[in-house]
Image: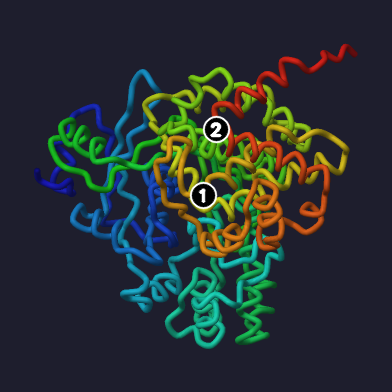
Amino acid sequence: MTRLSRHHLQSLPHDVRRPSYDRAAVRAGVVHLGIGAFHRAHQAAIFEEALNAGDLRWGIIAASLRSPAVRDQMAPQDGLYTMLVRDGSADRAQVIGAVRQVIVAPEDPEALLAALTAPDTHIVTLTVTEKGYKLDPATGGLVEGDAQVAADLVSLKAPQTAPGYLVAALARRKKEGLTPFTAISCDNLPHNGQRLRGAVLDLARRHDPALADWIAAEGAFPETMVDRIVPATTADDVAALGRRLGVEDQAMVKTEPFSQWVIQDWFCGPRPAFGAGVQVTAAVAPWEEAKLRLLNGAHSGIAYLGGLAGIDHVHEVLTLPEARTFVEALWDEAEATLTPPPELDVAAYRRDLMARFDNPTLRHRTRQIAMDGSQKLPQRLLAPIAARLEEGQGVDALSLAVAAWIRWQAGVDDQGAGHVVDDPLARPIAEALSGASDSRGRVDAILALGAIVPPKLAEHAAWRETLMKWLSVLETHGARAALAKLRSEKDAAPVVVS
């Protein structure tokens, strides 16, 4: 089948929305690091709306810091791709034209540095996943033992990391008399703007203290919170869309109707007139915390428990009444640790989240969510656990989710089917667990990993026992039995009348 391209835009079905602007007149005001499905369904769609509104400064030059896969999908399509929005009863298709070019950084680092240094570049966004920042989850500092970080500490002529590219480009901008760009992390890291700024300043200071001072004074690293569920695209998705469009789209993405982007009001240059779905605010942290602990925390628990039970998709896990009880119990525990902004109705947010999880057309795979758990659990599950323990509160549901992650490290589910443990710390975790002969030993081994579990939390004796209890149930009886046990304990809990 012929690939989607600019030549097919006018012949697409009438119900497919397409760019309303002249793509040839667009300037690239945004450079994005880490182009993947999430960026294409979230930030790129938002900049597309700015272009459709007539502000042609917000085209995107995107970069992959690792694989050429997305470039190879998009280049034959003139950078065009379809965003399919599914809500369970209907879907909407929109062709996005905001991405002007995709650079594969390892193949041509100079091209990416040139894009970052261009006078038209005002904003740099990043979706490089938690591990892409090369930060120690416990300390927040650069992981100097990482080979790519070590290389960037020696030379930034051909950077290896996202912070390395930012520092090298900012050095050039300073030398050429240009202002810095606004660097916006769109990954699920707590205080993501501060962490990105810290990584950049740390690396810059190692090379040129005056550069670090200039970045600190003139640059902007706003905190952000992003929220949209974007499942991985399958071959069946591509085939079905091809039948609908009459052309093949290898770069398509599928997503849900809900989209949210909360951005701290801190820019050092121009920005679009953001429309619906974007909230510029003085304080992002309360929004970020609610999203990490409610949406992302529940997602992780669903992923590991559902994956262990041999269930492929989120909505299928939630057909189990005991799984719904688990999610509500986890939310009850996590909600007590939040300080939500006045605009956030947590009860309504929880109802909306459950409806989003129940959306059967998304087919969000549990194994996709289960990736990189060592980088995700500290902010999603361990932080609310620590907060509740400080107040002497129970943490059964949150602990069951952590225990399920530990069980996942064995590489087999409850039926004995194998899976790959896709995690940057998979090897040290496996080495730590290799000497453990029982549930208690495996809990002790995990709690000794300071890169994942904060020492103060690891030393909490009562929590250690709770974690061991749930891991023992998981290893002996399986995920479904653990969910059933949690449900029975919740049903048996006394009702407190105030």
Q: Residues within 10 Å of mark 2 (few under 14, many from 20)?
A: many
Residue 42 pos. (x, y %): 45, 44
Residue 54 as seen in the image, left or right of residue 208: left
Residue 366 pos. (x, y %): 45, 38
Quadrant placement of the N terminus: top left
Q: Residue furthest front?
A: 437
Residue 93 pos. (x, y %): 30, 32
Q: Nearer the viewer, residue 358 or 48?
A: 358
Q: Nearer the viewer, residue 217 or 325?
A: 325
Say which amino acid is labelled 1. Answer: Ala
In the image, residue 304 above or below residue 30: above
Quadrant placement of the C terminus: top right
Give the secondary structure at mark 2.
loop
Q: Which mark is residue 478?
A: 2
Res 456 → quadrant: bottom right
Q: Earlier in the sequence, mark 1 or mark 2?
A: 1
In the image, residue 58 above or below residue 303: below
Q: Which mark is residue 216?
A: none
Disc 1 marks which residue?
410
Residue 178 visible from this viewpoint: no
Q: Residue furthest left?
A: 1
